Image (cartoon, grey):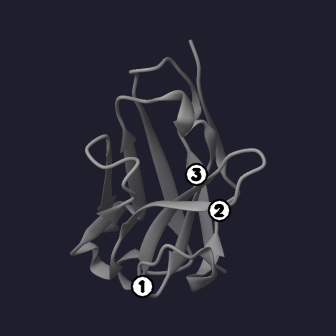
Amino acid sequence: QLHLVESGGGLAQPGGSLRLSCAVSGFTLEHYAIGWFRQAPGKEREGVSCSSRGGGSTNYAESVKGRFHISRNNARYTVYLQMNSLESGDTAVYYCAAGGTCHDDPVWYDYWGQGTQVTVTS
């Protein structure tokens, strides 16, 4: 059975950093694209970043370009999202998801983690 578990969320001050981890089990990580999404209260779930199948390419939402960095360690079955220069607008529940290809639309992903809360506040 496929599982994804996020960790690393918490409180951060504006300008601070957090690193989220997505630990996967039950499947070979390199065979899947892994996306990070976030959902703030009252808003739709939005794509943040994605690492393509095998990790050969990455993409980012315009709102996080230059601040967030996605990486993966296939041998450790973990995908990371390094978040720097955090802003209050980054406050949301962050989810990782596995699918066949990177896409902004969550419907393209088959498996989801339970989410981890990120709160940016002074």
Give SS at disc 1.
loop
Q: Quadrant of residue 88?
A: top right
Quadrant including the C terminus: top right
Q: Residue at x 59, y 64 (%)?
A: 4
Residue to which mark 1 is pinned: 101
Q: Is residue 7 above or below residue 30?
A: above
**Residue depicted at x 25% and y 44%:** 66
The amino acid sitting under disc 3 is Glu
Please indicate whether residue 12 sits to the left or right of residue 33 in the image: right
- Which residue position is annotated with label 2? 113
Question: In the rendered structure, are the residues bearing label 3 and label 2 in contact, judged by CB atoms less than 8 Å apart?
Answer: yes
Nearest to the observer: residue 45 or residue 72: 45
Residue type at the position of mark 2: Gly
Question: Label 3: which residue?
Answer: 6
Looking at the rendered structure, the secondary structure element under dot 3 is strand
Rendered position, 64 above or below 86: below
